[in-house]
Image: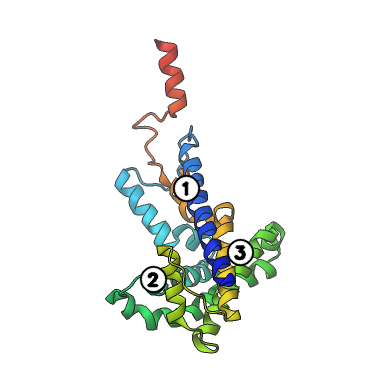
Amino acid sequence: MVLTTIYALLFYFATAVLLFGVGYKVYQYASVPAPLKIPTTPAPTTRTGVVLRMLREVIWFESLFRANKWIWLFGMLFHGALWLVLLRHVRYFIDPVWTWVILIQPIGKYAGFIMMIGLVGLLVRRIAVERIRYISSPSDYLMLVLLLAIGGSGLMMTFVLHTDIVQFKAFMLGVMTFSWQPIPPDPILLLHLTAVLLLMIIFPYSKLLHAPGVFFSPTRNQVDNPREQRHIADWAKRLEDASSS
């Protein structure tokens, strides 16, 4: 019961840090003024065009594709497979399990291998390419190592050392409903969960925050219409109104 209590409390703590941390960062991003028109050209000249550009950036990593094909390839492998793996894990948080979650299980099961290939590629590139190694900080390696630990331990439980997933699901549902159930004491599962908890706590303060951050980048979300419409920041508009009144 001690192990169950520790991990249940850690899940509450990590979830609170993740939600409040990401929420605060998004508030900071939204509050930072953008005093200049600085969209990366060629840029769309309408709001609809900006939306389409953001979709291409988020789904297809368009700017990364233009910059470096190898990084784009490993990034696409990792992010695409990660989504499939995450969707597969939805079954641990709902009861009964939705039909589409059942259908995605075989695909998500093997997507873990693709996710690991993408991560290994990104790690090798960070170590082998001199200019990338020069600008890399310890936190860059920590993120990759944590993700590799999560993916590797997950694959171990899926294909080699199986854990009691029925009991684990009971534990997760118990955490969500504040009716704690015993957690399976398997070492690989505990390693997997510990790495996930660490990642949840670190996420709001790491470079992984580029996920919501891309939506607030003025080089991506601005309309390229400086000749048609005057751009003025809110704080500058208030000063102008005050001086004219």
Return the x and y of residue 156 as percentages of the image width and height: 55, 84
Coloring scheme used: rainbow
Callout 3 amino acid: Met
Could you tell which of marks 1 and 2 lies nearer the N-terminus? Answer: 1
Give percent across and percent down for residue 35: 48, 32
Q: Nearer the viewer, mark 1 or mark 3?
A: 1
Badge 2: residue crowd in 10 Å (few <14, some 14–19, many ≥20): some
Rounded to the nearest angstrom, the CA distance separating label 3 from label 2 is 23 Å
Residue 182's disc is none
Dot 1 falls on a residue whose secondary structure is: helix
Residue position marked by numbered label 3 in the rendering:
143
* Three-letter code, disc 2: Val
Residue 23 circle label: 1
Q: Are marks 1 and 3 in contact (CB under 8 Å)?
A: no
Q: Dots 3 and 2: beta carbons under 8 Å? A: no
Is 223 left, or right, of 127 in this rendering? left
Residue farthest to the top, as pictured: 245
Q: Nearer the viewer, residue 4 or 125?
A: 4
